[in-house]
Each structure stands twice: as structure tokens, then as C-alpha cells.
Image (cartoon, coloured by chain):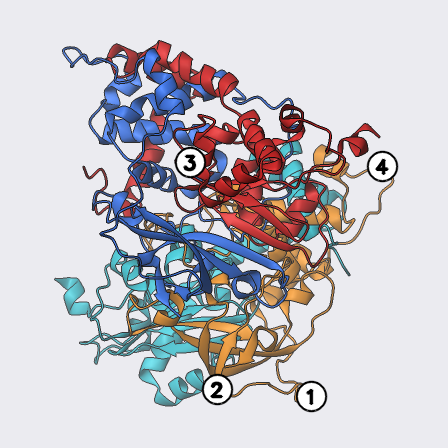
Chain colours: A orange, B blue, C red, D cyan
Amino acid sequence: MNGIHDMGGMHGFGRVPQDPEATEPVFHEVWEGRVYAITRALGPWRKWNIDTGRYFIEMLPPAEYLRMSYYEKWFTRMVTLLIKTGTVTREEVESGRAAAGSERLTPALTPEMVPAVALNRNIPSSYEPGIVPKFRAGERVRALNIQPLGHTRLPRYARGKMGVIDRDHGVHNFPDTNADGRGPKRQHVYAVRFSARELWGPEASAHDFVYLDLWDDYLERA
Amino acid sequence: MNGIHDMGGMHGFGRVPQDPEATEPVFHEVWEGRVYAITRALGPWRKWNIDTGRYFIEMLPPAEYLRMSYYEKWFTRMVTLLIKTGTVTREEVESGRAAAGSERLTPALTPEMVPAVALNRNIPSSYEPGIVPKFRAGERVRALNIQPLGHTRLPRYARGKMGVIDRDHGVHNFPDTNADGRGPKRQHVYAVRFSARELWGPEASAHDFVYLDLWDDYLERA
Amino acid sequence: MSVTGAESASGGEAQQADHQHQTVPSDISLRVKSLESLLVEKGLVDPAALDALVDTYEHKVGPRNGARVVARAWTDAAYKARLLADASTAIAEFGFLGVQGEHMVALENTPKIQNVVVCTLCSCYPWPVLGLPPAWYKSNAYRSRAVIDPRGVLQEFGLELAADVEVRVWDSTAELRYLVIPERPAGTEDLDEAALAALVTRNSMIGVENLASPKQVAK
Amino acid sequence: MSVTGAESASGGEAQQADHQHQTVPSDISLRVKSLESLLVEKGLVDPAALDALVDTYEHKVGPRNGARVVARAWTDAAYKARLLADASTAIAEFGFLGVQGEHMVALENTPKIQNVVVCTLCSCYPWPVLGLPPAWYKSNAYRSRAVIDPRGVLQEFGLELAADVEVRVWDSTAELRYLVIPERPAGTEDLDEAALAALVTRNSMIGVENLASPKQVAK
């Protein structure tokens, strides 16, 4: 969706805020750490995937998206998805108590598992020889001019623009379909190099380039 | 500027709110009418022009732009420009009282003048034979891919896109320069017809078109 | 006069506006009253002129003006020709003049062409013929969607167009202001100009509604 | 599992999220506590696991990890070659693994090439090597400007690039995560790997800062 989250190229947000690197806390408030940790601890239940998670932040009303802090968005997304997946009910969220007679589970993530979950590799290999790449490094491509109503990772600023395949990143899930239950539709992802002049016009520096990771389904031969 | 105001083509704002035509008030609150009227009554002082006025709404921080109601934006813009032009001071706005010893003027707009100002024509003719149009009806043009940091009336969704000159609207001020004191740079404006497929890609209807009023300086021959 | 400096584009102005918003009283109604009394005290505005302006746009200028133009175009072929050729001058015959109506263009809807007007960048609107814009016209939803999903927007207004009707969305990026001439409804052959004008809705002159025949309405 | 329906794109979901935001208690800290206690009561999360997660990202995972990778790349040509060829595997030699670091790519800055990393669509970031992202990286200002005005952004970080330096902005739109290898500062020939790692800043591994020589810093 062409949501407010797709903000690459926008003006008006002012200067980049600067916190001293040495002293900025990882979490600025205690509740931020809890929101982060709860989100992570819910992961092993596999109630939703990462693309769905991103999609449900993007669907916040634009004014709310801009008003909320980063972890406030995470919190709102989590509540929405917990209810949407039937994991909890709205009444339970409002009361903060489990409904009488509701199921009591055993946490999927125990403290002993945290080092493994946080620090170990756990990802499907991206090497799938059965899935053939459509493009090779060096080929000229055009990002499609499409306007998906759902989740997409093709930003507006690159649509219709020409670039060059820089490298093949292997096979990955396709976010547009993976986000809304239509399946992972695994395919190759490439780093695509766009000149700033192609993206932003002749006043951009001839020495500036933007690299985007784009899926086969976002590209056509140019 | 590529501000939040440039929202043509965005998703996420939901359905169009519907008020019954027969009963919707012109002003939903008394203060809205006052903001509208004060803005109009300040017009004859010529402290700023219409392009500057639009620019100062666009420069609201995006979160504020989306949070504020229409006339709240007008009010904020008015206060900013009254201070910026030295018409009032920040202290006067905060206190609601004129500073001791400050000049007392005579209102530029009297009640007797209202019908004339509201209802009569008062505009420089757009017929200026000395200013030659660059394009003619039927010509194919491309909207420039430019990213002005200041005010512009070339929306992002049309940049780099091809269209056809539908008609010549005559000579008008150029908003990009008129908004920030660089002068009216008068030039021809055209209605330019873009196909929805050119703007939004092949999934758009072949029967949909968008007409934009664009200035000579926004266009090149395609 | 230059009111903007080099810092504008980098957000300096915006931050200033934001700051200022924080420092004035929190209730918008009080803040407006306070500003008005300041401007009156300084002699910048006359409160009676403000009253007259509010009264003008609440009671004297509005879509009934545009409806009269449309009704005449329906009943007077020569007028319609003048309106389509030079709308500003043709509308001036009624005395509907003034700010935001200086450069008018009339757009004729037909069974095969639906014109729809929007202003994606702000909320430009032809004040002298339609009055001040309704809330929906100023909404972010309408501004954002009219150009990318005009048929979806029209459906929300109850207007389902055949796939082969050409939709022309006019995004009011300049000082041109657009008045849509809706199709004259069937079954209105016997009505005079005033009765016809009474049928013309505001929304039909923006292009988001087509007019039903009076018989259909009566059902 | 499909958690989204056809109504999603038309804003139904968004309105629901908004509504819900209104109906939970207003103070975010209380709302989070309330949700945590609910999830604990239902057996969905273990509070000790939450504590361990917070502790992990506050104290065990952070930019010191990435700094060690960079220092080794500076001092071990074979390691650097492995890192550039397959960063995920080379970084795994340190045990810096896990979520948001599964598909790593290392980008080498040179006097003629400045790599800069951003995620315009959200705030993707290589957690195992850099920890959780700083506020500036998540800011709308950085996300919006890094791709259209990279040199202006770098100037705000104090980095003035010569006009002919190639700027490569990597917008993390997929699950690839980028680690910038900054240039090794001059005057560090005598330092060992640990001392070199101490020089490497977080911001230099995002590409918005270049490292000064220790002698310059001492001045």
C-alpha cells in the first residue's frame, strides 16, 4: 500500500535527531523493552509472520503512524494481531485478565531458550536450486509501476525506474503474498542499483546511487 | 517540497467521510468562520500572496498537518505569517494585546467593501501577448522529474510522466518562485491530460484520465 | 517581499510553526478569539467586516449559484456554448464573481464522460459558484484517492459507472477552478429554469454524483 | 493462516486498530503492563524469558559485536575476503547470529565509495552485529531523506564528502542486512585487533560517519 510508511524521498521531517552514541540507552523507557521482548517471545507461537507484522504497522491510520513512537507502533500492532488471530480477546486486553475458563498454555519461549533464539541462526536456507532467477548481475531492469493495495516492499520512489542488477541475494519469501496469507511464493531477490538521477532527476549528483533489494515479481527487463 | 500535503495516490486514509449535503453547515464551529474571515480580511494588506499562504501550510510538520483540522491549519499558518511579516509580534499573539506604543492602523477591509471583495472580479488578466506559450494543444509533453525543496504545484505522482496538452489556460504566476519572494515569473499554464495507466501502471482502467494544470517550467517536449 | 529564507526547506519554518502552536493557548476557540481581538486592537481587521464575510459565505454564496448556471446551460444552448468556451465570462453574467472563481472552466458530463474535480495538494474549490468546500472534499481520503481510485471513490458516493465510461479527474493544481455540468436528468422536459436549478446538487457539480430523474426520486 | 481479509486495504483494519487504540488505557506504560500480565496469565509468555530478552539486547548484543568483525577484517585479509564474499558465514565465526542477521552483506567503504544503510519502509537493522537501532535511525527524517539527500544527511553527521566520492545508499527493503566496513583510520598501524575494535563506532558501521585517526581525536 502507498502508505505513510513509504516515506523515502519525502521532505518536511526536519533534521535527523542526534543522540550521543555513547550514552543513548537501548530502550528509552522500561515499557519499550517489555514491548520488544513480548513481541519476540510471541514469535515461536508463529501466530503471524514478519511480513504480516510489518503490514499491520503500515495499516495504522497515517496520523497515528506519525504521532506514535516506534515501540508504541509495535505495541498497537501486537494487540491488533493478538486479537485478530484469536490468541486473546478484546475484552481480555481491556480488562488485563484472562477470561474465565480460557485455556492456560505453557510459554513457547523459556528463559533457557533465549540465548539460542536471540543469538543463533534459525532461518530456511536461501539456496533453492529449483527456483530459477529471472535476472543476472549486470542486466538492466525496470521496477514495475504497480500500486498494490496490500503490503509491498517496492517503494513508490523506485516504481517505473530503471536500474541494474548488482547481485543475486538468493531465494526469499515474497512479502506481498506472504503478508496476507496468500503464501510465501518464494523467488529470487536482487540488489538493484539505481542512479540518483534516474530516481530524482537531473539535479541529483551523478555520483549518488541507491541500492534496493527487489524481488523477481517487482522487475521487468528494461 | 515533497510534503505530506502532496497526497495524491496515497492509500490508508480510509473511506471518504460523508455529510448530508442538505444539512452540513458551512462552518462546523464558530471559530472556523472567524479564521476564514480574518484570513480574507487580512488579504487586502497584501502581507503575503496565495502561493506563500499555501507554502506555509505545507511546511507544518507532517504529524501536525494530519492531526489538525482544515481551519486549524489556516489559523496556524496565519499566526506564523503575521509574525514572520512583522505584522504582529509573538508576544502580542501570546498576550492577545497590542504592545504598548505599537502602531494603530485603519482596517483595510470595511464591511461596506465585503460584497465587492467577496463577489466581484479582481484579478490580473491572464491575457499577456508578450508571453509566448511553449506548447500547443495536442502536443505530447513530459512532466519534469524534479524535487523542489520549496513550494511547487507539480505533484509527485505526475513527475516523469507523459501526457498531452489539452488546452492553454493563459498566463499565470509561477507558484514555485512566487511563494518565496523570487517573483511571479509569469508563464503559460496548460491542462495536461495523463492516462491513468501512465500514472499508475497497467492495472489502471484504460478509460481513466487525470488532468493537471501545469506550468511551462514543469514541462518538456516528449 | 520575501517571507521565507534558506532555512525553510530544511524544516526550520516547520519547526517554528510547531513551536508556536505549542505556545498559544490550547483551546482553538479561545486562541482564535484572542487573535481576533489583537488584530482588532491593532486596527488590522474590522469585526463588522468579519461578520459580513461569515454571513456572505454562510448565506449568500453557495451551490445554489452554480445550480443556476447549470440550469441555464441546460435550457439555453447559446449560453451553454458561451459557458464551455469561456466559463469565467459566462458565469459573470450572473454576477458570481470573486476570489477563487476568477478563472473558471466548465466541464460537461455526458453518458460517456464523467468529469470529477479534486485538489490533491490542498482544497482548491470554486467559491463563487459552489461556496466553501464540504468536509469530504477537504478530507485526506478524497484528496489521496480521487486520482488513483476514482471509480472506488464514486462508488462510495453511490455512483457505479460502466467500465467504458471515460473518467476525467481534474486535479486543481493551478488557479483554474472547475464547475461540472451534470447531465440533465430524464423527465425534466416540462420544468423551467428555476425548477431545474432546484434539482442540481452540489455534489453533482463536483462530479461525484449524477442526477436522478425527479420521477425516480419520487419513487 | 490468513489474518487479513479483503477489507484490509480499504482501511477497515486501520480503523479497527485506531478504535482499539482508543479503548485501551491511555498511559502506554500501564497498557503494556496490563498486556504482559494477561499474556503471562494465559501462559503465552514467561516473564523470566522477557527479562532475559531485555537483558540480552541491553547488555550482550550491540555494536561492539560489529566492531570486532570490522577490526578482524582490517587485520586479516583472508577474513575480509570471506566477509565480503559471504558475510553471514564469516560473521557466524564470531557466533553473532540470530534474528535480523540471517542474511548479512558487508559493504566496504573506500576513499572513493561511501556506503550508507537505511530502511525507508520501516527500520530494518542488523541486530546481531549492531544491536537494536538508535532513535535517529528509526526517525522519519532519516528514513525519508537518506535516499533523496544522502549528502545533506551525512553533513548533519559531520561528514562532508568530496563531490566525486560515490555515495551508495542501501535501502533495506528485503531480509538482507548490511554492515558497513569503514575505512581503517590512518595512524593505527601499531594497534592490535582489540584496540582497533575499540575505535569502531556504531555510526561508522551504518555508514554515516568515517573514523578519525586516534591522533586526530587526541588533538
Say which amino acid is labelled 3: Thr
On screen, residue C209 versus residue D62, left or right, reads right
Q: Nearer the viewer, mark 1 or mark 3?
A: 3
Say which amino acid is labelled 1: Gly
The residue at which mark 1 appears reads as A130
Q: Residues within 10 Å of mark 3 (few under 14, many from 20)?
A: some
The disc, 1 or 4, on the residue closer to the chain's N-terminal end is: 4
Q: Residues within 10 Å of mark 1 (few under 14, many from 20)?
A: few
Question: Residue at coordinates 30% horizontally, 49% vertically from top-left?
Answer: B176
Q: Is any part of residue D61 visible from this angle?
A: no
Question: Residue at coordinates 56% horizontally, 79% vertically from top-left?
Answer: A220
The disc, 2 or 1, on the residue closer to the chain's N-terminal end is: 1
Q: Nearer the viewer, mark 3 or mark 4?
A: 3
Q: Say if labels 1 and 3 share a chain.
A: no
- Which numbered tag is attached to residue C89? 3
Q: Position of residue D18 (x, y in %)?
A: 63, 39
The residue at which mark 4 appears reads as A100
Q: Position of residue D189 (x, y in %)?
A: 21, 80
The residue at which mark 2 appears reads as A139
Q: Nearer the viewer, mark 3 or mark 2?
A: 3
Q: Nearer the viewer, mark 1 or mark 4?
A: 1
Q: Say if labels 3 and 4 share a chain.
A: no
- Pointer 1 chain: A
